[in-house]
Image (spheres, helix red, strand yellow):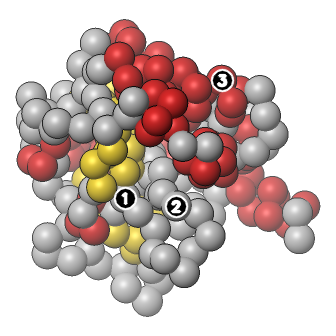
Amino acid sequence: MLPTIISYYTPDWLYSTYADKMRIRCMGLDLDHHIVEIEGTDDWLSNTRLKPQFILDTLLELKKPVLWIDADGSLYKQPSLLDDYPYDIGLRLRPEHQQRQWHVGTVFVNYTDEAIAFMELWADRTNNGSWSDELVLDELWNEQPVEVCNLSIGELPPEYFQMLRATDPVPHNNTVIAHRASKSDNKMKFKERNR
C-alpha cells in the first residue's frame, strides 16, 4: 500500500499555489492525499514546529502510512519504493559536511507502534521547545531514539529529496520528490531578526 501524501501550508508566500500543484499531481498519480491549509503564526519558526504534531495527528486519524512532503515541494512520480515499505520511518540523510543528520522536507512514517512512539516524542519535544522541527529531530537522533523507541529507519534515496537550486531549477529524470529553499516573508523576517 502506498502512503497517503500529507502536508499543510499557511497562507503566506506561494505555499497555497505549491500545495494546489501537489494536490493536482497526487490526483494525476492516483495517490491518496491530505493537504490542508492551517492558520499560521506570524513566525516562520513557530510554523515549522507544527509539523511533527500534524504528522502524528494525521497518522492516527488515517491509521495508515503517510509521506510528509513540505508544501513547497514537488511530486514528480509515484513513490513506489514506499509501497509496503518495511521501515517505521524513512528519511533522507544530509551530506556528511552538513551539521544536521536528516532532511525533514520528505518524511515517511509507517503506521506502527514504534513510529507512533517516536512521533509522540518528536512532537512533544517540538511543542515544548523553541527550536525548529529539524533541530529537535537532530537532538533526538543524538539521544539514540532507535534504541529508545526500537525504531527501524530506512534511508531514502536521493531521488526522494532533490534540492532544486536557482542554478539547477530542473529536476533530474529520476526525481520523485524535489524541494526548493523557501523564501516566504515569514522566513525572511526570521532570518533578518536572527542575523
Q: Is residue 195 visible?
A: yes
Q: Earlier in the sequence, mark 2 or mark 1?
A: 1
Judging depth in this view, the residue of 143 and 106 nearest the camera is 143
Q: Nearer the viewer, mark 2 or mark 1?
A: 2
Residue 172 rendering spot, x and y as whole percentages: 21, 77
Is label 2 in a helix, a strand or a loop? loop
Residue 92's disc is: 1
From the viewer's perspective, is 100 left or right of 169?
right
Q: Is residue 77 left or right of residue 6?
A: left
Q: Give the residue pinned by disc 3.
A: 124
* Vertical order, 90 against 65 (above or below): below
Looking at the image, the residue that sits furthest to the bottom is 167
Report crowding for label 3: few under 14, some 14 to 19, many 20 or more residues within 10 A (C-alpha): few
Q: Mark 3 or 1 closer to N-term?
A: 1
In the image, which disc is placed on residue 24? Answer: none
Q: Point out residue 30 in the picture as x, y percentages from the top left corner.
A: 9, 35
In this rendering, is residue 179 above or below 130?
A: below
- Tell me the element at label 1: loop
Q: Quadrant of the N terminus?
A: top left
